[in-house]
Image (cartoon, rainbow, N blue to C red):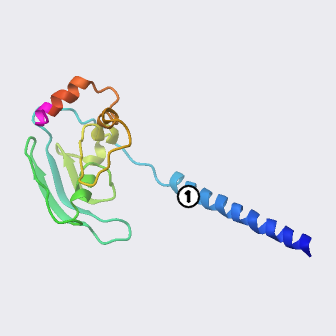
Amino acid sequence: ILMIINAVSKLISSLENFYDVITGIEKIKKITESPSEKSGTVELTKVEKGHQIELINLSFGFEDEQEILSNLNLKVLGGQKVCISGPDGSGKSTLIRVMSGNYAEFTGNILINNIPIQNYDLSNLRSQLGVLLVHQDIFKATLWENIQLGRPGILPNEVIELAKALGFE
């Protein structure tokens, strides 16, 4: 009887490990089988006056939730400054993330310099954007590593010039 109990006990503990492995494989499968991000080929070039961005009937919502943004129309000219404000949960951060190409499952159009955002090379586009959200965390690294994140070739004098231009003297 003791041998049978020990054998069943080993079987149960082995099944627990087996279940953990199967669960891990399912999680990996979900990530590896998710569709890869589609990126265009147009590169966003730097311009002196800034870029024009236009939203035409833009709507967005997460998979199982109601729309957060609904039929939004907006046109910001190059060099123009715009303040997006509202109460917590009103969709400000989501709007910024959609406009920067981080959420692609929207309806309507986002045009940058009259070219749809889907036509842009997303890594090039994101390398030229700076988005700072209120609850955004700094990475656990040095200040310099946080500043140069995604731009390993940036020089200290470029950061100093930008800081001065933004009034951080």
> Is residue 118 in sight in this rendering?
yes
In the rendered view of the protein, which quadrant contains the C terminus?
top left
Find residue 37 and report its horizontal and vertical position in percent: 40, 48
**Residue type of the residue flagged with mark 1:** Lys
The residue at 53%/57% (across/down) is 30
What residue is rendered at 60% in x and 57% in y? Answer: 24
Q: Is residue 108 visible?
A: no
Tell how many labels.
1
Q: Which residues are magenta?
A: 164-169
> Around disc 1, counting alpha carbons within 10 Å, would you say few (fewer than 14), some (14 to 19), or many (20 or more)?
few
The percent coordinates of residue 71 (x first, y second) are 19, 65
Main SS of residues in magenta: loop
- In the image, taking residue 121 as reference, residue 83 lies left or right, namely left
Q: Position of residue 38 (x, y in %)?
A: 39, 47
Q: Residue visible at 23% across and 63% down?
A: 91
Q: Quadrant of the N terminus?
A: bottom right
> What residue is pinned by disc 1?
27
User: Is 139 inside the magenta-drawn segment?
Assistant: no
Camera-side residue: 31 or 93?
A: 93
Side of 43 relative to 32 (left or right): left
Q: Name the secondary structure under disc 1.
A: helix
Residue 50 % position (x, y): 13, 38
Classify residue 140 as left or right of residue 73.
Answer: right
Q: Is residue 135 positioned above or below 126 on the image?
A: below
Give residue 2's quadrant in the image: bottom right
Residue 168 shown in magenta:
yes
Q: Residue furthest front?
A: 2
Q: Where on the picture, by quarter, is residue 151? A: top left
